[in-house]
Image: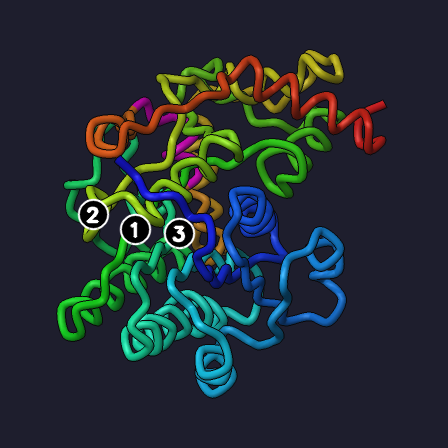
């Protein structure tokens, strides 16, 4: 059984972003007193209009974060903020690792009841054809995002060990749905241009999770007793192939145009180009586009009673309706 979040004071980092915004609104709808962290002035206006309290601060500034805890009662932390891509590369360390570390330390000092950390399936790296689950050992593989998420998890667990902080780690997959900048908006735009990569006939494995399904998991982890000290993969039921997932966006356009290559050709091109563009991690992406390994969500089902309520068919339909409503798709 999971306790209700109603009445609980919950700090949501990354609340002005895609996943954080959905989480903040869901928690607010469930009766929680949400404190939505806003770094850039004005980005939280839509949340404020919905009745959510905005707290201003930069997650990378330890003093600012401490001041928020000193001023507000915080019972639960839902840490979603992250640096996903782009320069400077130092921001991966500063945002993903250092900020997570000092937020966990401050949370422990404040005696919060639960620290829910949003990591990523990127921690599994280039697993290709290998099946993985939450017990799979993690090792850095040269990708700044994946590597710093591994470090962040390690820092969090170390802080919890030293302080008794109660934590949960959720590793989301490819989070799609209305408003998703990467796995919905970008894919729809690429589909229109014929840029979607259909490699090896699209037989590689995709790891989609519809935004509402992920938020269900995050909210459950905020209070469920069986979540304490655990790690859960946030992926929908599968297997889902790249051809099925990317093909859904092609059907929206509709179009048959795509970048179609055999796997060996893509891997060969990546190997040739990697010395010239090492930061692009081309071999990593080539490996994943071809890989047929699976990422299990069974642990969340068994321990939390969670299951993805929105199917891929329904999630794609909702995404398409939103894409047309916003004019991204005509």
| Residue 68, position as x, y percentages in the image | 50, 78
Vertical placement of residue 64 versus 219, above or below: below
The residue carrying mark 3 is 118
Report the colour scheme: rainbow
As drawn, 250 above or below 218: above
Q: CA distance from mark 2 to mark 1?
A: 6 Å
Q: Alpha-carbon distance for marks 2 and 3?
A: 12 Å
Q: Residue at x 60, y 16 (%)?
A: 248
- Quadrant in which the C terminus is drawn: top right
Dot 3 crowding, Cα within 10 Å, few <14, some 14–19, many 20+: many
Residue closest to the far front: 7
Which residue lies under the disc numbered 1? 169
Instruction: Return the residue found at the far bottom.
Output: 63
Quarter of the N terminus within the rendering: top left
- Crowding near pointer 2: few (<14 within 10 Å), some, many (20+)? some
Q: Quadrant of residue 285?
A: top left
User: What predominant SS class does the magenta segment belong to?
Assistant: helix
In the image, 201 versus 72, the foreground residue is: 72
Q: Which residues are magenta?
A: 285-292
Helix, strand or loop at label 3? It is strand
Instruction: State yes or no: discs 2 and 3 in contact (Cβ < 8 Å).
Output: no
């Amino acid at each position: 059984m999971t306790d209700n979040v109603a009445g609980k004071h919950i700090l949501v980092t990354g609340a002005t972003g895609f996943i954080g915004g959905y989480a903040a609104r869901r928690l607010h709808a469930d009766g929680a007193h949400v404190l939505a962290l806003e770094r850039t002035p004005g980005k939280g206006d839509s949340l404020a209009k919905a009745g959510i309290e905005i707290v201003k601060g930069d997650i990378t500034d330890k003093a600012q974060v401490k001041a928020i805890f000193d001023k507000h009662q915080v019972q639960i932390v839902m840490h979603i903020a992250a640096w996903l891509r782009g320069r400077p590369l130092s921001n991966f360390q500063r945002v993903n690792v250092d900020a997570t570390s000092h937020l966990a330390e401050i949370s422990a000092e404040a005696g919060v009841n639960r620290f829910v950390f949003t990591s990523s399936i990127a921690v599994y790296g280039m697993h290709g054809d290998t099946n993985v689950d939450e017990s799979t050992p993690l090792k850095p593989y040269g990708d700044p995002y994946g590597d710093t998420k591994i470090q962040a998890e390690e820092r969090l667990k170390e802080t919890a060990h030293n302080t008794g902080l109660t934590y949960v780690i959720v590793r989301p997959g490819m989070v799609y749905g209305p408003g998703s900048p990467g796995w919905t908006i970008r894919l729809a735009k690429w589909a229109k241009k014929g840029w979607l990569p259909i490699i090896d006939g699209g037989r590689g494995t995709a790891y989609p999770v519809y935004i509402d399904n992920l938020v269900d998991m995050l909210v459950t982890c905020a209070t469920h007793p069986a979540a304490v000290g655990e790690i859960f993969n946030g992926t929908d039921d599968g297997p889902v192939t790249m051809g099925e997932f990317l093909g859904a966006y092609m059907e929206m356009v509709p179009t048959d145009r795509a970048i179609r290559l055999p796997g060996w050709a893509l891997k060969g091109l990546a190997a040739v180009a990697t010395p010239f563009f090492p930061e692009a991690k081309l071999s990593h992406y080539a490996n994943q586009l071809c890989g047929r390994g699976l990422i299990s969500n069974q642990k969340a089902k068994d321990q939390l009673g969670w299951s993805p309520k929105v199917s891929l068919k329904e999630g794609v339909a909702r995404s398409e309706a939103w894409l047309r409503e916003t004019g991204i798709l005509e």
